[in-house]
Amino acid sequence: MKSSLIEVRTGKKEVVQNITPQCAAFAREAGGDGLLHVFVPHATAGIAIIELGASSDDDLLAALRDLLPADDRWQHAHGSRGHGRSHVMPALIPPYATVPVLGGQLALGTWQSIAFVDLNVDNPDRQVRLSFLAG
């Protein structure tokens, strides 16, 4: 299995960040057919396969704000206000995704992208592990 870490800089804001180009480059380098596994080794971030652009990323953040408000209701209360919601989010947006790779190319649908999702404004530097299992 081939594996690599990529760095994701989120700044100090909630993000839905496109990591498809980095995933595609990794799959292309691995070559052949197999599975690309994308994993976030953080307790407060997730991976979504979603249409990006066309405001879908803004819609996802708005939906997460509605479901997980940044207020004082959370038992897990260290960090910024509402930080506990960031620890709940991976139950809704899992910290992983697996994408088929055919001939070194991601087999995503026409409008699908791989997105890093993070509501945690306390940690601006993140990592994502990309792993390729040849088939």
Image (cartoon, rainbow, N blue to C red):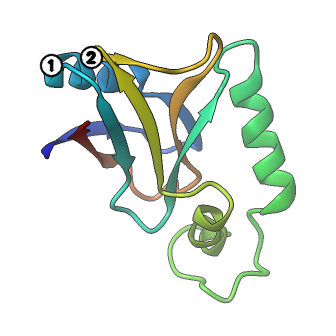
Place of residue 56 in the rendered image (x, y in percent of width and height, measured from the top left): 75, 25
Residue bearing mark 1: 29
Picture quarter with the C terminus:
top left
What amino acid does circle 1 point to? Glu
Could you tell me which residue is drawn at 71 percent across and 81 percent down? 74
Secondary structure of the residue carrying tag 1 is: helix
Residue most toward the bottom?
A: 75
Residue 82 falls in image quadrant: bottom right
Disc 2 and disc 1 in contact, CB within 8 angstroms: yes
Could you tell me which residue is drawn at 83 percent across and 46 percent down? 63
Per the rendering, the mark at residue 104 is 2
Between tags 2 and 1, which lies in front? 2
Place of residue 64 in the rendered image (x, y in percent of width and height, measured from the top left): 76, 51
Mark toward the start of the polypeptide (2 vs 1):
1
Say above or below: 51 vs 17. above
Say above or below: 42 vs 60. below
Could you tell me which residue is drawn at 55 percent across and 23 percent down? 113
Residue 16 falls in image quadrant: top right
Q: CA distance from mark 2 to mark 1?
A: 7 Å
| Residue 81 visible from this viewpoint | no
Image position of 40 (left or right of 59):
left
Counting other residues with Cα less than 10 Å from the Cα at mark 1, is it few (<14), some (14-19), or many (20 or more)?
few
What amino acid does circle 2 point to? Gly
Place of residue 79 in the rendered image (x, y in percent of width and height, measured from the top left): 50, 73
Place of residue 38 in the rendered image (x, y in percent of width and height, measured from the top left): 37, 44
Which one is nearer the viewer's eye here, 116 or 110? 110
